[in-house]
Amino acid sequence: MTPSDLATLHALAFTQSRPWSAQEFAALLNHNSVFLVALPDGFALWRAIAGEAELLTLAVEPKVQRRGIGTQLMQHGLQEAATRADTAFLEVAEDNQAARALYAKHQFSEAGRRLAYYARTSGDAADALILRRNLDAAE
């Protein structure tokens, strides 16, 4: 997937907040610490530095959500992350129930919270939950 492909898919999947641009994806992908896990209808972008892997973003084409693509992206991402780090973490909007269920399925648990972190196009801002897990049991 090109940075433009990533930005297009990200915009389809993230309708409650500002999607990332092709330039932002290109800049991230230029770093050795960043790796991409991609499938035809989804992707996960990770960064691994100093023993920690961070899931930067995960997007699945809305038309095919809830068909296991997110699970596949997480499995592949966690496998790669385990070769680069000891722990993994991510941030997720508290009101994103589908993503929270996916991350719970992959043994992430709450480690912190950022109040009113995610601005919303309509309504109140959502808290960001900081989730983490050890990678010694990565799938």
Image (cartoon, rainbow, N blue to C red):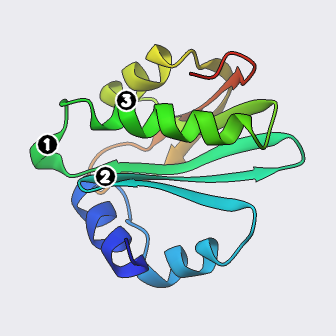
Q: Position of residue 135 (x, y in %)?
A: 72, 24
Q: Residue furthest bottom?
A: 23
Q: Position of residue 111 (x, y in %)?
A: 71, 22
Q: CA distance from mark 2 to mark 1?
A: 9 Å
Q: Residues within 10 Å of mark 2 (few under 14, many from 20)?
A: many
Mark 3, residue position: 71
Q: Is residue 60 left or right of residue 117?
A: left
Q: Residues within 10 Å of mark 3 (few under 14, many from 20)?
A: some
Looking at the picture, how far across and down is residue 52, in whole percent? 80, 40
Say which residue label 1 marks.
64
* Mark 2 element type: strand
Of pointers 2 and 1, the one earlier in the residue sequence: 2
Give SS at disc 3: helix
Figure label count? 3
Mark 3 or mark 2: whose residue is earlier in sequence: 2
Residue drawn at (40%, 55%), measured in percent from left and top?
38
What amino acid is labelled 2 in the image?
Answer: Gly
Bin the neighbour count of mark 1 within 10 Å (Cα to Cα): few under 14, some 14-19, many 20 and up. Answer: few
39 in relation to 85, above or below: below
From the viewer's side, name the closer residue of 139 and 26: 139
Label 3 – label 2 distance at C-alpha: 11 Å
Label 2 sits on residue: 42
Which quadrant holds residue 132?
Answer: top right
Q: Is residue 127 visible?
A: no
- Check residue 32 in the rendering and tell me which mark sits there, or answer none: none
Coordinates of residue 81 in the picture (x, y in percent): 68, 40
Of the residues under marks 3 and 1, which one precedes in the sequence? 1
Assess whether mark 1 and mark 2 are in contact (beta carbons under 8 angstroms): yes
Which residue is at 67% across, 44% downward? Answer: 54
